[in-house]
Amino acid sequence: MPQPSGERRGTGGDAASRLYGTVTVGGLTLAIPISAIREVIPRPAALSPLPATREDIIGAITLRGATVPVLDAERLLGIASTGPCPIILILRDVDRVIGLLIATVAGVLPLGDDDLTRMAGNADSGGRSALLNTAFAHDESRGMVLDIAALAALPGMPLAVERVSVPARSERAGRGIATLLFSIGSVRLGLAASVIEATVPEQAVGPSPVDDALWIGWIVHNGRRVPLVDTLRLLGLGLSGRSERAAAVIVRLASGDQVGLRIDAVRDIRSLTDRDVTSLQGFRVGNHALFKGLYDFDGASLVLDPHALAGDSALAGIGRVFEQTPQTAVQRRAGREDVSAFLLVQLAAQRFAIPLAQIEEIIATRTSGIGLCDDAQAISDFIVHRGRGVPLINLHMSLDMPSRPASSCFTVLVSAEGNHAGFMVEELCAVERATIQRSHVAGSGRELDRVAATISTAGGTYSVLDLREQIRMRCAPAKAA
């Protein structure tokens, strides 16, 4: 019996070969290898009659001049209907095709060996055990893998031989790139499945740790928190804004990090060649560096350049900073329970580590213009934030660092005993997990009073800043009740 073609994640194989398109029918989620999906089309008002020996063949459609049989998936699999099936999924087995009636297109999932479970069962008259011999479980998605080769081998199953109408079609037959078509607002987009880690259905969006128009929050995928970006703003096509819930296409960046592109809906999965994508010529519109061209079928879609998107510097910065590794997994690998997370920040030419547990929020640095400052306390000004007068503390002055930058891009907000302060930094570099190493403090210099520990990572050793202690040293002790 043919085996599912998914590879184990992390084996370094072809990423596209382990991707599956997921669809729903009768309440069941089916996973189908991306290579076996040719396209998705709306079901016409009426199907053409087609003589067939199988009860699950309900007619045919005419697709670009070719007659393609249509298979009722609910009858084929023996499952009860839960609603209408308005979509026809065109499946390919080598050079033969057939249409499968489905309810919805769910998206794309990467399935490795650890996601798949072989199901042992007795063959029945309909051959259903051969069609659905593997179950999958990936994050919150559960379902069965549909074996296309077994489907094509069922007795009396009619498949149409793909037509070759022109030489160009012959050259590109079976050699297109699986492309996911989706939408956000009124914009239709396409992206090669090779850079897609998964699509995730609508879920709650956590707040972004940075007050930034591009980075609008985070979602959970496969046990990880993945940063979510405003897709329209990234592409220079407008704003989709923040919302409490959102669906997303998760993109695998060149660095290996993951970033989610907010979407409204998955529309289609198609196999596209370069000849299918129309150039935008030399015109510069939006973030044109990320655009490959237009695909025109049932309305034009803007196809994104997968290599440019995976290597985009703005996405790389977000993916690098955000905490994507679950703490428990890191602790298991390290064999310790005292591993903590730290935000690495840039101050002049140095990097420092701030305990992530101390950070309440990160916002873009802004000044009030009040001029309420105190150099002795390293307070540069006060801002009003969330109903509080919050001091902006210049860490360069506080740590007696000789260099003073012209500006600080980000402010890290921390509280201690009910008092809130913002600490200005130039750059957010990364989130690292490490074991804190306490050091003996000798001397009375201001910087030594605040830097009394280090962490070591693959990138080097960094001094830890206790920002809560910096707040306590600037505030009067709380009065006893």
Image (spheres, rainbow, N blue to C red):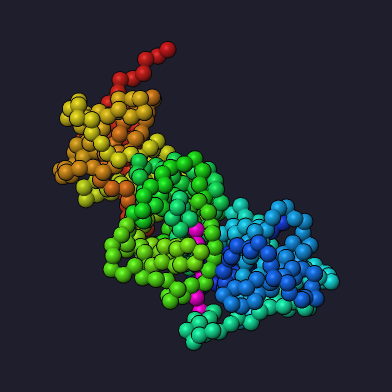
Vertically, is 265 above or below 152?
above
Boundaries of the magenta span: 175-182
Vertically, is 360 above or below 129?
above
Q: Name the residue located 36 percent from the left edge and 53 percent from the top edge.
A: 237
Q: Position of 310 compared to 117: left or right?
A: left
Q: Name the residue located 35 percent from the left edge and 45 percent from the top edge.
A: 213
Quadrant including the N terminus? bottom right
Q: Position of 403 compared to 108: left or right?
A: left
The image quadrant of residue 49 is bottom right
Q: Nearer the viewer, residue 342 or 16?
A: 16
The image quadrant of residue 48 is bottom right
Whether residue 318 appears in this view of the structure is no
Q: Position of residue 256 (x, y in %)?
A: 43, 62
View extreme (bottom): residue: 167
Q: Is residue 176 magenta?
A: yes
Q: Name the residue located 55 percent from the left edge and 72 percent from the top edge.
A: 17
Q: Is residue 220 magenta?
A: no
